[in-house]
Amino acid sequence: MDAVVADLMKGPKTEAIADQIAWFKKLHDRCAKSPEAMVQRIAPPLKDAIDLLTKVSKSKKDQESRETQLKLTGYVLTAQGLGLYSYLEGLNEIRNQVAAAAAKQKDGSDAKKKALATQAMTEQLIDGLAKVYQSLREAKFDQLDQAAKLVFDAQKVAESLKASL
């Protein structure tokens, strides 16, 4: 899920219609074929974006129309919101696993200290991503730039968590 959400936050390489369609198709296929239900639910708005871009691809006027841009923005924001929400769910599961592992450790042990530090770091990431998600829901788009950085930070934490579990 990490790579899908990170790619979703980055966007296509260019604004050329062919690049946009290719990016949406690649991302849609990854989401639709994912074994994770959390990732699969991101696919429908991506498909809607593909359909819209394919429909308007032959007309520059249609591509640039306000209605097209609003619809496309809506599909992208919906997909990003679902991606962030799914990522939050995944991080919450990891945090719960770390908390359960910490509870089994002897008080004062290095293993318990490490588990509690990892749990705290995971909670900070969850809080940061939750703020970005809430900003998206409230249409406060100025905070969305933080999303990609937080997702990359979360990837690093998730990798270290997987190694420590």
Image (cartoon, rainbow, N blue to C red):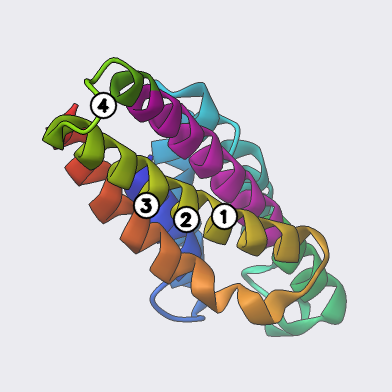
Q: Which range of residues does the magenta coloring cover?
A: 76-99
Judging by the rendered image, the residue that carries numbered circle 1 is: 127
SS class of the residue under badge 3?
helix
Whole-number angstrom distance, CA of label 3 to CA of label 1: 10 Å
Task: Tell me the residue that label 4 is attached to.
Answer: 107
Amino acid identity at mark 2: Gln
Splitting the image into 4 quarters, where does residue 156 fall? bottom left
Q: Nearer the viewer, mark 4 or mark 3?
A: 4
Residue under the point 45% across and 38% down = 91
Picture residue at 52% right of the left edge, 22% below the top:
37
State the SS at label 4.
Answer: loop
Q: Position of residue 160 (x, y in %)?
A: 18, 44
Residue labelled with disc 3: 121
Which structural element holds mark 1?
Answer: helix
Q: CA distance from mark 1 to mark 4?
A: 26 Å
Amino acid beneath label 4: Asp
- The reply to whether dot 4 and dot 3 touch (C-beta < 8 Å) is no
**What residue is drawn where x is 70% and y is 52%?**
78
Numbered tag placed on residue 124 in the rendering: 2
Q: Residue 63 location in percent, x, y?
A: 70, 77
Q: Nearer the viewer, residue 126 or 152?
A: 126
Whether residue 34 is visible, yes or no, is no
Q: Amino acid at mark 3?
A: Met
Q: Is residue 153 left or right of residue 112?
A: right
Q: Residues within 10 Å of mark 4 (few under 14, many from 20)?
A: few
